[in-house]
Image (cartoon, grey):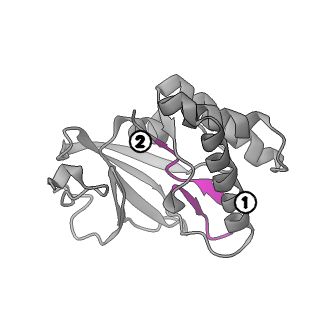
């Protein structure tokens, strides 16, 4: 298997003054997460993004915002290229945490289960099944709070406008704040 065939990005942390000496706390298919400073009591991380879709999700002027989306503090520009060929972007965002056992975890499980069920219902549409499944969640009353329903609609709009594929199944794509608020941390990927 080649390095760029791995489901998790294998690149080292790029050499940049903001990143030197920082502890890595996570990796995904196209991102590396390192600790950043706490500012005014707000814990932050640097997300080193190698996907144009992820970069747009965090920095586009029309990106989804609100209660269930990550707070972005700064886009610090690019540093080199990933082994997958895209530039690395350094984006400073709020620190999020894995889902515990509280209300956020319950809602996340319901969203992931409903999303997977909708994907299975629309699987004959192949690549478009994820977008149709997200549309299904966004327009079908399923007992979500108004804020979650609005967030699903905003995510659907972003996915359509940016040609992104939604992914609400993986555990790390739905995370939470320390106060227990559910956050769509990485709910899209490139086609």
Q: Residue at x 19, y 55 (%)?
A: 16
Q: Give the image location of residue 118, x and y in percent.
A: 66, 42
Mark identifier at residue 116: none
Q: Rounded to the nearest whole Å, what is the CA distance between mark 1 and mark 2?
A: 23 Å
In magenta, the rendered stretch is: 173-188
Q: Give the image location of residue 110, x and y in percent.
A: 72, 57
The magenta stretch spans residue 156 = no
Q: Badge 2 is on which residue?
A: 54
- Dot 2 lies on which element? helix
Occupied quadrant, residue 175:
bottom right
Give the mark nearer the N terminus: 1 vs 2: 2
Tag count in the figure?
2
Q: Give the image location of residue 122, x and y in percent.
A: 62, 34
The answer to whether residue 63 is visible is: no
Q: Residue at x 61, y 37 (%)?
A: 155
- Dot 1 lies on which element? helix
Q: Is residue 162 above or below residue 116?
A: above
Q: Neighbour class for label 2 at 10 Å: few (<14), some, many (≥20)?
A: many
Q: Nearer the viewer, residue 73 or 29?
A: 29
Describe residue 159's horizontal placement relative to residue 113 as left or right.
left
Q: Residue at x 72, y 60 (%)?
A: 107
Mark identifier at residue 107: 1
Badge nearest the viewer, 1 or 2: 1
Quadrant of the drawing holding the C terminus: top left
């Amino acid at each position: 298997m080649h390095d760029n065939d791995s489901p998790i990005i294998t690149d080292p942390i790029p050499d940049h003054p903001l990143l030197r000496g920082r502890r890595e706390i996570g990796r995904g298919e196209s991102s590396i997460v390192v600790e950043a400073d706490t500012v005014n009591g707000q814990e932050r991380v640097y997300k080193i993004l190698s996907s144009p879709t992820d970069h747009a999700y965090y920095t586009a002027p029309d990106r989804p915002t609100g209660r269930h989306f990550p707070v972005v503090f700064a886009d610090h520009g690019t540093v080199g290229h990933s082994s997958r060929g895209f530039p690395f972007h350094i984006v400073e965002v709020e620190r999020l945490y894995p889902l515990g056992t509280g209300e956020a975890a319950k809602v996340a499980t319901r969203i992931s289960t409903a999303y997977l069920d909708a994907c299975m219902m629309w699987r004959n549409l192949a690549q478009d099944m994820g977008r149709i499944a997200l549309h299904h969640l966004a327009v079908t009353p399923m007992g979500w709070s108004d804020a979650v329903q609005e967030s699903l609609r905003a995510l659907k709009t972003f996915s359509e406008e940016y040609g992104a594929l939604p992914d609400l199944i993986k555990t790390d794509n739905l995370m939470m704040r320390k106060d227990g608020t559910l956050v769509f941390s990485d709910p899209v990927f490139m086609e």
